[in-house]
Image (cartoon, helix red, strand yellow):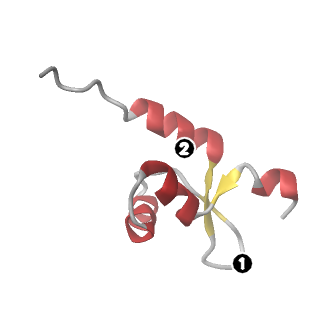
Amino acid sequence: MSNAISNQLLRGAEVAEMIGCSRAMAYRLMQRGTIPVVRIPGGKTVRVPREAFLEWIKENTRAGVAA
């Protein structure tokens, strides 16, 4: 995979770090289809497109509750 493309596709560990969850939880969200993924042909490899992930974060961000 070219370097330019690999910079646009996130690994599960990178997703987990960005949203502050465990790697296992990130992979569960990816497996359920909650977080959009790209399947790499020829194996079990999945990656998350950076732009789609950032859009998912925007769509799932809610205002805090007033105290």
- Measured from the top left, where is residue 43 in percent x and y? 66, 79
- Judging depth in this view, the residue of 38 and 22 nearest the camera is 22
Quadrant location, the C terminus: top left
Which sits earlier in the primary sequence, circle 1 or circle 2?
1
Q: Are marks 1 and 2 in contact (CB under 8 Å)?
A: no
Judged from this view, the residue extending furthest toward the left is 67
Q: Where 16 sits versus 60, above or below?
A: below
The residue under label 2 is 53
Q: Is residue 55 left or right of residue 9?
A: left
Q: CA distance from mark 1 to mark 2?
A: 23 Å
The residue under label 1 is 42
Quadrant location, the N terminus: bottom right
Give the amino acid at mark 2: Phe
- Measured from the top left, where is residue 65 in percent x and y? 17, 25
- Measured from the top left, where is residue 64 in percent x and y? 24, 26
Q: Where 57 sits versus 34, above or below?
A: above
- Measured from the top left, where is residue 42 in percent x and y? 72, 78
